[in-house]
């Protein structure tokens, strides 16, 4: 794979000078186009140490309008990063529409380095590469153009230039111990990188291997490729804007989960008053155990309006110390959130270790209200199922226990609760035009919920549908379900 | 001070029930008003352990529309927090306009606890309280309403109720070792809190001491007080909207810094080519030493358009490894930023320890372009000087070295560079209508800059005005100035 980058490409000073002005015009023009587009860009500058990655970035920042660009050089993860899924730190770096992020070091760094120096197992390596491909595909679909560069230099040349730098007292600082560490492992590093690149060289995010021995050739090639790839990104986005084929409407089977629920189940006050504190105390003990094991818990609550989500959530949080939990109520996205991939707003608020986070509505809005009201395109909600499954897999892989509850009531009961809210002044804020509009689409919501259970109930993140006609029964069932899962997990 | 909260206030169940509906209507109404207002609110629930702080918060969250509220319970600081000024974590929690944040534990927690248990010196304690007052005044001016509660319970009652809870196997978890630790120090804790409250009981952010022995009285009082204080916040904001007295125009003295600069100073290419790598190498060595001492560096660059900020910045960053620095170009604020106090957008991006952060334009925009173009009110830019000084003091107190450069050129030279930019295609993006408009206000910019030097050049964050007529000279002077400061500091 790298042989093609060992053929001695060069650009003479004169040729370089002749082309420079035009190159700078072109790259600024495309950056302007980016700023006006619905896309953003992530540029990865990878390659061997000493191939001039930093120099390339500095050159790009001089040619481009640096004000539109953020540069992130991978450093050791902070504890806030270590306490979250590995991809969290990269989600933090995703630029808003119109802007560009340049990465020195990426989600390829850890796998390649640890595989090279022997720490990482084959299976982990494979999974990391699969995750990378999935992540990049999602980014691309969401309008983030990925431009991946790999700067390559032959071992011999590398050693020669490093020795030369070291001789110069004013330049020697540019050569670090780390550089030599890599050179010693050059062969192995080359093999591992070759495999990583080969297996992640997708149509959505191809690798561009650049021969890096000659600065002028390296910088010019990177710039020219960047221009071409950004343009490809604009074109793709336009295509994506065109509505895809209408999806076939999902028709739930006659006998489905909602039909099989027993809405008559009740729990009388006396039983409830006895069982609630018992359940809360046991839940609290389990949370202590969870924390002692450095795990954390995410609870997702969905369900029809007035199904009793808020009340159930409070019965859960009552059993926790304030510093151990947070309730996230999903509000309208801010413009910083709208300018990024859909799941970004959820990634940015992910809990740290040892915490309980409760979502009052969640990322499933994408395949419920947004789908039904047409707030997102068919393409967006259709791929959301797998994107959500991947998201929750990463949560679970990082030690987070994910449990999802759908509180279900009958249309009749909802009507009763709506009317009660309308006559109780301090409940009126809970009942809006929107609730009535949603209610009129009852069947679509049920159908979408069933499709959602079918596509997103996973062993590592199961859905529990709760009969919520009787609030006492629902609240205790939620607590007991959490308890039994925690017992299994811990 | 606390005697007033030891008189046995109670509310009977019947009275409570009778008033509850109205209370809930009122608190929802004021929350609605908040959502529509230009203010936000921070509610601090402080007090002795075991006075029911968490229970009070849970009650508020049940009465209010929880979707408008974020709750933060103070936990041990993360390393990302420890690597920044102490107030950083609280800046992170400031809500956007229309929303409310409830804090369990605040900027008072550390001073009171460490003073109680003997860790903190008198002088530190005093400074912490002064900082709190300054911070709260700033928040208030920026439209953040602070509502500070202190829940008080007599020692005897506290011990009794804790013992009672401990006897109940289902409730015992509510009493922690920490609670007992505090009870044992009750007397000292009471003294320290009394002083802290007394000295931070300002008109802008008064303390509300609430007798907390009776839950119904405690929760009702907190809710009623919250309603009243939020209303006061709306009123204040409206007053603040009314333009204050016009400030006297600042007339710079005939002989001022800009007149005394020698714009003829030059550095020829040969000297420059020799001195640049020398300066960069020395700068790099000093940064290594800085990092070994866990310090960090913030460089601020201001100056007229085309004064050469970008070029000077690149000569600085060329000497650094990519992972050690970031360049922040100040762009237009996002809506999340516009919805919060002015300095929030700078706090949120503060560098971690061991880093170099370069600001291409900065928070000084407030007293330059925003002041001159009228993008902010007179009140806002007039108080910005002291707010910025306080901000930079906190940076410096936390070990960050702050250096500020103003690159100065003559109006004649600026015109030459503008014209050059207009005829060089890849420089045209750098020259806009705005630049010409700014140029037409040359004198106002000079006057504002002089006032800025006068009011914000501090021993811990000095301004250096750089003769930038000759780019080589300016770039070397910047590097040498940084070097000499680092030598002094390290």
Image (cartoon, coloured by chain):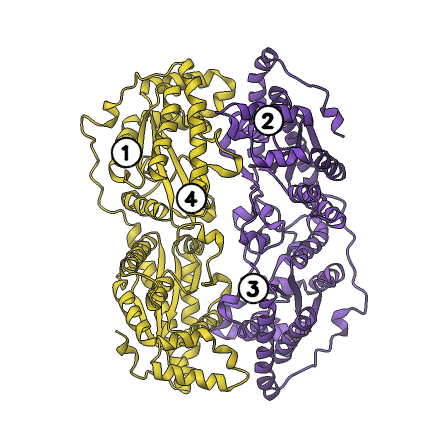
Chain colours: A yellow, B purple
Q: Which residue is mark 1?
A: A448
Q: Which mark is residue B355?
A: 3
Q: Which residue is mark 2?
A: B162
Q: Residue at x 37, y 73 (%)?
A: A48
Where residue B223 appears, x then y in whole percent?
Answer: 61, 25
Name the element at disc 1.
Answer: helix
Q: Is residue A439 left or right of residue B437?
A: left
- Dot 1 surroundings within 10 Å: few (below 14), some, or many (20 or more)? many
Q: Which residue is mark 4?
A: A293
Q: CA distance from mark 1 to mark 4?
A: 37 Å
Name the element at disc 2.
Answer: helix
Q: CA distance from mark 3 to mark 2?
A: 48 Å
Report whether mark 2 lies on the same chain as mark 4. no
Q: Is residue A253 left or right of residue B110?
A: left
Where residue A147 appears, x then y in whole percent?
Answer: 35, 64
Quick one: B411 or B267, which is closer to the camera? Answer: B267
């Amino acid at each position: 794979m790298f042989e093609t980058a060992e053929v001695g490409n060069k650009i003479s000073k004169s040729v370089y000078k002749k082309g420079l002005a035009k190159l700078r015009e072109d790259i600024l023009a495309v950056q302007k186009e980016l700023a006006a587009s619905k896309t953003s860009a992530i540029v990865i500058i990878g390659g061997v140490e000493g191939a001039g990655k930093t120099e390339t970035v500095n050159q790009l920042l001089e040619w481009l309008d640096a004000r539109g660009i953020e540069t992130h050089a991978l450093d050791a993860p902070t504890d806030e990063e270590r306490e979250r899924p590995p991809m969290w730190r990269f989600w933090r770096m995703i630029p808003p529409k119109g802007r560009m992020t340049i990465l020195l070091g990426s989600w390829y760094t850890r796998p390649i380095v640890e595989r090279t120096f022997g720490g990482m197992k084959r299976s982990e390596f494979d999974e990391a590469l699969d995750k990378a491909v999935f992540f990049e595909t999602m980014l691309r679909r969401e309008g983030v153009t990925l431009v991946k560069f790999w700067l390559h230099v032959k071992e011999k040349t590398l050693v020669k230039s490093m020795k030369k730098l070291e001789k110069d007292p004013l330049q020697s600082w540019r050569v670090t111990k780390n550089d030599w560490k890599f050179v010693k492992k050059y062969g192995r590093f080359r093999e591992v990188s070759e495999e990583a690149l080969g297996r992640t060289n997708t149509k959505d995010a191809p690798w561009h291997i650049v021969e890096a021995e000659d600065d002028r050739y390296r910088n010019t090639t990177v710039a020219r490729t960047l221009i071409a790839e950004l343009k490809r990104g604009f074109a793709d986005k336009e295509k994506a804007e065109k509505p895809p084929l209408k999806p076939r409407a999902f028709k739930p089977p006659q006998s489905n989960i909602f039909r099989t629920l027993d809405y008559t189940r009740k729990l009388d006050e006396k039983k409830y008053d006895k069982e609630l504190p018992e359940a809360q105390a046991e839940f609290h003990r389990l949370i202590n155990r969870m924390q002692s094991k450095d795990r954390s818990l995410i609870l997702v609550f969905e369900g029809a309006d007035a199904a009793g989500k808020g009340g159930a959530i409070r019965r859960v949080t009552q059993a926790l110390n304030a510093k151990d939990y947070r309730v996230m109520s999903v509000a309208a996205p801010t413009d910083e959130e709208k300018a990024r991939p859909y799941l970004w707003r959820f990634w940015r608020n992910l809990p740290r270790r040892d915490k309980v986070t409760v979502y009052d509505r969640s990322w499933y809005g994408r395949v419920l209200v947004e789908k039904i009201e047409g707030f997102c395109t068919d393409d967006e909600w259709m791929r959301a199922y797998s994107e959500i499954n991947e998201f929750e897999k990463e949560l679970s892989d990082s030690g987070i226990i994910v449990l999802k509850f759908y509180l279900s009531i009958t249309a009749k009961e909802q009507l009763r609760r709506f009317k009660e809210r309308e006559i109780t002044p301090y409940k009126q804020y809970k009942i809006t035009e929107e609730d009535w509009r949603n209610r009129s689409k009852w069947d679509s919501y049920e159908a979408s919920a069933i499709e959602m259970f079918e596509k997103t109930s996973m062993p590592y993140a199961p859905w529990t549908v709760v009969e919520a006609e009787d609030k006492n029964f629902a609240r205790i069932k939620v607590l007991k379900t959490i308890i039994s899962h925690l017992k299994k997990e811990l």
